[in-house]
Amino acid sequence: MTPPDPAIQSRLETLRAKYANSGQELLDFLDGLLEADYLTYWDYIRLDTLLSLQQPRTQHHDEPIFIMYHQITELYFKLVLHELNAAVAAPMPGTAEWTANHSTALTEHVRRCTRYFEALETSFAVMTDGLNRDQFLRFRMALIPASGFQSSQYRMIELALARLNDLVHADLRSEYAQENDLSKLLENIYWRRGATLVETGEKALTLKQFEAKYDAVFADRAQKLRGLTLSDRAKILEQNKELGDEMRLALRELDHQVNVRWPMQHLKTAGRYLAKQPSDLRATGGTNWPKYLPPKFQLRIAFPFLWTPEEREHWGH
């Protein structure tokens, strides 16, 4: 009889101890393994479900492209949030729990986020160059009032990156620089002006829908992240002279990618499809895209203390 493999015996003992700790029998789980089928690729990633999620509202050939690209974008946003949520859950710099390992991990989280946004920026040619303009202008009418403006994940990313005071509309940022009332800050957050009717200044239906569904979610996230955002962490490291060159560069790259390069890609695409003389076409959500998208108008900067006054002045130019 062949003697048992010591490695297998060791694993079995480890498993036995694991299940015993929760009052379970190893033998039951081994029987389960005997009954279980092998995992397949299509089951693991839920491929059939994934491929069933594209439901065009028109017969235009290019509408599925539009849908799939936005779905891909949301998956990338989920990847970004996966990293940011881990980053803001870690110990705060300046505390006894903070270690050099946490600093290394934070830098890696930031780099991954930048990498995901770079992939999105590069792939935006799918939208900028890959749609038939006539088809787009037709099928977009079936989407009203839906708009990419209503991406809750993008707002969740912003709330994890920046202090709420730095997300207030640029016109009010100085006034609200020291404001601590979260409700006031959220009421004046920049994106609320992005979906107002040009003619009247009233909220577009797109914004009303968005607020009704997500305002409570955003308020809860802002409350939980108060003092814990990536900006708060970077500020402490900067003040303690512990912000190394690698992390500083990583943070600046992420800031520029999220708040300049990404909106500029949107602006470029909107200009291609919606710019028209003598006046531009409106976005599906009624957003005032010529004023909302350009970073030089919004001046959104997640880490303003990492940029020189001159760099901030020329932001997005």
Image (cartoon, rainbow, N blue to C red):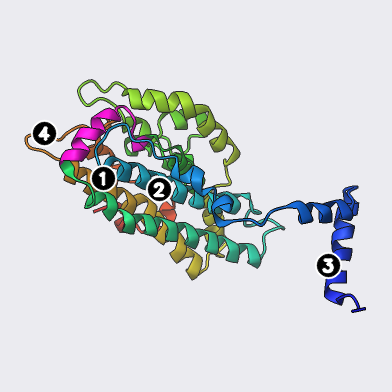
Residue farthest left in this picture: 278
Q: Of marks 1 and 3, which one's residue comes earlier in the chain? A: 3
**193 and 133: which is toward the camera:** 133
Circle 4 sits on which residue?
279
Q: Position of residue 8 (x, y in %)?
A: 83, 71
Check residue 86 for magenta coloring.
Answer: no
Whether residue 59 is situated above or below residue 257 in the rendered picture:
above
* Closer mark to the observer between disc 4 and disc 3: 3
Q: Of marks 1 and 2, which one's residue comes earlier in the chain? A: 2
* Closer mark to the observer between disc 1 and disc 3: 3
Q: CA distance from mark 1 to mark 2?
A: 20 Å
Whether residue 2 is situated above or below residue 240 in the rendered picture:
below
Q: CA distance from mark 4 to mark 2?
A: 29 Å
**Residue at horizontal 88%, vertical 55%?**
27
Q: CA distance from mark 2 to mark 3?
A: 41 Å
Classify residue 287 as left or right of residue 78.
Answer: left
Classify residue 19 as left or right of residue 79.
Answer: right
| CA neighbours of label 1 inside 10 A, class few (<14), some (14 to 19), many (20+) | many
**Residue at horizontal 89%, vertical 64%?**
13
Residue farthest bottom in this picture: 2
Instruction: Say if residue 135 shows up in the picture.
Output: yes
Q: CA distance from mark 1 to mark 4?
A: 17 Å
Circle 2 sits on which residue?
73
* Closer mark to the observer between disc 1 and disc 2: 2
Q: Which residues are magenta?
A: 134-149
Circle 1 sits on which residue?
294
Amino acid at pointer 2: Thr
